[in-house]
Amino acid sequence: MIPLLRLFATAVTFLTRLPLARWSYAEPERLAQASVFFPLVGAVVAAIAAGAAWLSLQLLPPALAPWCALATAIAVTGGFHEDGLADTADGLGGGFSRERKLEIMRDSRIGSYAGLALIVVLGGKYLALAQLSPANLFLALGLGHVLARWSVLPLAALLPYAREGAAANKPVADGIGARQVIAATLLSAALVAAAGWLAVLAALVSLIVVALAGLYFRRQLGGITGDTLGAANQFVELACYLAVAGAQRWT
């Protein structure tokens, strides 16, 4: 198989449950190279979620379309990013020292902070999407999923990995640098360009969220972990939906 297609399959296998593992690379270094395709994986997830929303609009009351889109995206990704959000919320909410926060984040059990974070973020995404016209709903899904996957790269490139030792995600995070960020940014721009000024708005909002998340993770943990990257992903996705909803309200 062509190496670029194998890298894309590697990105898909890492971020979703789609069955492309047989064509993907297994080495962590290859995953760092494949990270440039994360926004394209976001576009694939968005297309599947938009398809579910469209089908729902044909068969069910309109209010169920956003729910179908969110549920489908979670099924496709296996709740990968939501799990990171939950672990991050428990760690940062329940720990006082950096070491204790990182220890809590390793615990697979869900705590009250995790539950509240999931309710707030998923509820916010549903409510924002529920305000949109069908056309803007599809645009918002594309913007949210593409830019959310893009957000991983600047955070991984600019911040150190917070955990000590050979953690599974460390070689991946360490392998993401300026080259990957630039390539992923150009790919993201190409993927969302059709949204016009809404893409510019969503990109600006995403940059702000990434900057704030990076500062917060640096202060709380000394850097990023795989869980915090998942949390940032969810914050960016929510911010994009809110931006589109706000733009629709005021235009």
Image: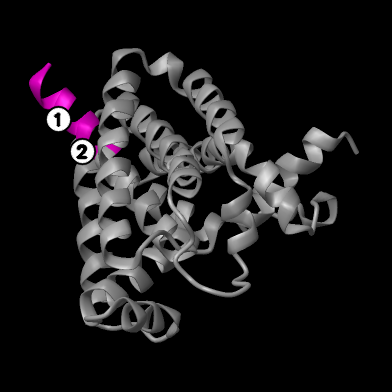
Q: Position of residue 68 (x, y in %)?
A: 39, 51
Provide the secondary structure element on which disc 2 rests.
helix
* Residue at x 40% of width, y 83% of height: 103
Name the quadrant containing residue 247. Answer: top left
Is 1 colored magenta in this rendering?
no
Q: Is residue 62 visible?
A: no
User: Chief secondary structure of the magenta span?
Assistant: helix
Please tell me which residue lies in front, 226 or 43.
226
Furthest toward the right, the residue is 1
Answer yes or no: do the residues labelled 1 and 2 have beta carbons within 8 Å? yes
* Residue at x 52% of width, y 18% of height: 190
* Residue at x 53% of width, y 22% of height: 186
Q: Is residue 21 visible?
A: yes
Q: Position of residue 231 (x, y in %)?
A: 36, 58
Residue 106 is left or right of residue 38, and the answer is left
The kind of residue tagged 1 is: Gly
Magenta stretch: give its range.
Answer: 240-251
The kind of residue tagged 2 is: Leu
Q: Is residue 47 above or below residue 97?
A: above
Q: Is residue 123 above or below residue 42?
A: below
Residue 246 - label: 1
Q: Residues within 10 Å of mark 1 (few under 14, many from 20)?
A: some
How are the residues colored?
Answer: one colour
Please tell me which residue lies in front, 174 or 236.
174
The residue pinned by badge 2 equals 242
